[in-house]
Image (cartoon, grey):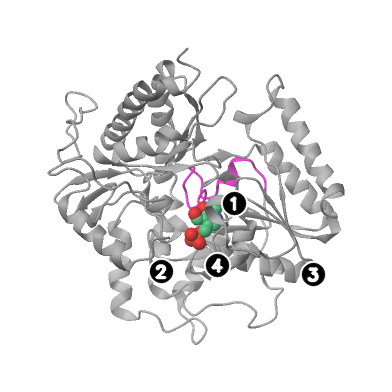
Amino acid sequence: MTATPPTRPAPEPAVEPASPSASRAIKLATWLPGPESVRLQNRRKQHVTAALGQVVALSVKSAQGSLIHDVDGNTIIDLIGGIGVLAVGHNHPDVVAALVEQAQQAVNPGMLVVNHDGYAQVAELLNAHAPGDFPKKTILANGGAEAVENAVKIARYYTGRAGIVVFEGSYHGRSNLTMGMTSKYGLFKKNMGPFAPEIYRLALPNLFRMPPGMSEAAYLDWCDAQLEHALVAYIDGPSIAAIVIEPVLGEGGIVPVPAQFLRKIREICTRVGAVMIADEIQSGSGRTGKLFAIEHSGVIPDMVIAAKSLGAGLPISAVTGRAEIMDAPHLGAVGSTYGGGPLAAAAAVASLKLLTDPEFLAGAGRIEEAVRRVFGAVQQDVPALGDIRGLGGMMAIEFIKDEARTPWPDPVLEVVQRSFRRGVIVMRAGLYTNAVRFLPALNIPQEQLEEALGVVAGVVREVWDEKKSETSFSS
Ligand SMILES: Cc1ncc(COP(=O)(O)O)c(C=O)c1O
């Protein structure tokens, strides 16, 4: 995604407080992006690959909780947290304290050289809290894609099979294997092939897009039947090493996968001897109100992958799974120079303390309630706001341009950019890039949440007024 260059010489109109008594967190000293942000953005343009995406052209000076202070003296509310990296907020004091303490002791002696207990501490916590009442083991890595690669490698080793089943709309990363597993060709894969073989992509239920006239129950049964059909039409069950599923699609538009479908995947994996892998890089680490989103369904995967908010901003990812599977590869078959290093591990231990605390996790439900309430009211007047969906602190609004629910991506970039100019960061999502997503910190203060959602809601109404003639709703 590229940022729109600043075109406005003056500040956006003042932002109304959520209620007359509420004090505003957003403080705009300049137009956004301000002059210093623009200057630094130019340096980025000159020296950084143009292929690197960016939601907004803001240069950050400091950040705390859900607030970002930029280099021009502006304070804005961050509802995206580095794309779901900051469930505990920017610079959580416990995380910073753990980092400082660790940095003074040892930065990275190397887990492939010596032992450092931080690695085992993270593994122990994940083994204890990941779903499943069986012995578990964990491997740590640096980022999401690397963790997915490890999960697939280990599943293939354990099963002695090659086939990997993935789903439409899924995002698993940008390494060659994970690009192959990722959906949305034009944005993530164009001109990057060839991709790894033995990856099979199947349809995924999306309740907002089920065939008109079909009941939800009939649709879900049909989706189950399609999965069985795939085992005849596309890949033989005994050739499948793993089925990899995001329990809530992230990049694909914040689409919660129905529990019935997750149960069907579980049933098939058990039946054919494949490993069920939950890619919880975006949906895990407390994001939906439980440590892992799949816990809402009661389904127990064989492996679960965490990253993003696990490290509270530090690069760390994890694959946690049945001990017999995780221990299958030969000695030396896995590992990386930096994976699970002491600094990132210290951050993860501190963040996991928060992310396993029910009181802290309750913030997710608060976010879902606010998004549904605020945009439910907007939906009364804006028929193009077709869907408000998600789970806990992982929410999206989807835009459509007619009764047939044809995806309407046009207003979405405008909503993102205009919200930013008024001091709120949100970003796009969806296979058709027609959704705006919210991934705020779970501890965002209620007033900041209301203020920020109020800004976005106001922008949605404005953009609708300007663009409604492009839809068939206006006639
Ligand atoms: C579900 C999912 N899997 C994998 C990845 C890749 O993670 P990373 O960008 O850390 O490689 C992401 C990143 O957004 C993700 O959301």
Identify which amino acid the numbered label 4 is placed on: Glu
The segment highlighted magenta reads 281-299
Q: Amino acid at mark 2?
A: Ala
* Residues packed near mark 1 inside 10 Å, few (<14), some (14 to 19) or many (20 plus): some
The residue nearer to you, when weighing 53 against 215, is 53
Q: Give residue 445's quadrant in the image.
A: top left
Q: Which mark is residue 185?
A: 1
Question: Mark 4 vs mark 3: which is more N-terminal?
Answer: 4
**Where in the figure is residue 97, as x and y percent of width and height?**
28, 65
Residue 439 lies in the magenta-colored region: no
The front one of 256 and 32 is 32
Q: Residue at x 16, y 37 (%)?
A: 11
In the displayed structure, 448 sits above or below 385; it is below
Q: First in sequence: mark 2 or mark 4? A: 4
Which numbered tag is attached to residue 146?
4
**Percent position of residue 28, x then y:** 16, 41
Q: Dot 3, how many residues are within 10 Å of its Cα: few (below 14), some (14-19), or many (20+)?
A: few
Kind of residue sitting beneath label 3: Gly
Above or below: residue 408 compared with residue 285: above
On the image, the x and y values in percent for residue 194 come to: 65, 65
Residue assigned mark 3: 160
Camera-side mark, 2 or 4:
4
Badge number at residue 344: 2
Q: CA distance from mark 2 to mark 1?
A: 32 Å
Q: Are marks 2 and 1 in contact (CB under 8 Å)?
A: no
Quarter-of-image position of residue 169: top right
Q: CA distance from mark 1 to mark 3?
A: 29 Å
